[in-house]
Image: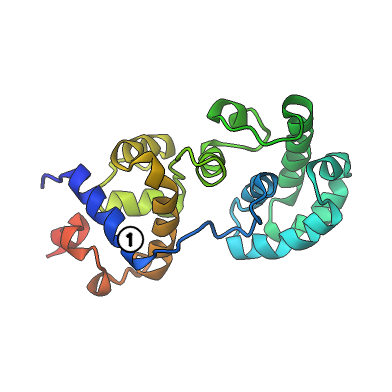
Amino acid sequence: MRIDKKKNAHICASRLEKKYPDAVCSLDYETDPWKLLVMSRLSAQCTDARVNIVSKPLFEAFPDVYAMAKADTADIEKIIFPCGLYKTKARDISRMCNQLIENYGGKVPDTMEDLLSLSGVGRKIANLILGDVFGKGGIVADTHCIRISNRLGLADSTNQVIVERELDALIPKENQSDFCHRLVLFGRDICSARSPRCEECFLRDICPEIKKAK
């Protein structure tokens, strides 16, 4: 079955915007780029809801990049323990903060290359920062994004970098951040991994998986 990816991507983006017009990042980073960077690292294998809870005492204890850079990693570990992988995350966050001070004057950089130079930062986090903070666009190829874009026929791989590139070619830069946030809501609300609500889906007419099952 031949799929017009460009056309379907446009339909998906339009309908997702209509369904979830106010979709925003689910991490409560209070428009602070540094907080989003830290919270993004905490979110690995952890829900955003838990990260939001844990981050409150974390930022109360260490309110800025300088305070966290000076902190003993053991003190960071105690606070972020509920997020899991706390030793690795505390180490990365400590190194990241020191790198920001040493290399970028305490500011979060605005290029992919510079963001990837920070400890614990991969393309997923870098794209989130570039899109949400700097408005440069960026496909956040997380679990929801990869699974749903493949299901809808917009991507043909489970490789994060390949999916990122495929969607980057289909979704305009200025819409990429919102598109990815809406995919997350869509994945939680309708197109879940275990029990997708296909009968209620507003994309069922263009979904190749549904058409295949008929």
x and y, in percent, of residue 140 in the image: 46, 45
Q: Nearer the viewer, residue 86 or 201?
A: 201
From this viewpoint, is residue 176 visible? yes
Is 120 placed above or below 41 here?
A: above
From this viewpoint, is residue 193 visible? no
Task: Name the residue: 27% across, 46% down.
Answer: 154
Task: Name the residue: 65% across, 38% down.
Answer: 120
Q: Which residue is mark 1?
A: 16
For the C terminus, which image quadrant? Answer: bottom left
x and y, in percent, of residue 66 in the image: 84, 40
Is 133 placed above or below 209 here?
A: above
Q: Is 60 situated left or right of 28 in this image?
A: right
Residue 47 position by quadrant: bottom right
x and y, in percent, of residue 40 in the image: 62, 49
Task: Name the residue: 54% across, 30% down.
Answer: 112
Amino acid type assigned to the residue bearing label 1 in the image: Leu
Task: Name the residue: 53% across, 56% down.
Answer: 25
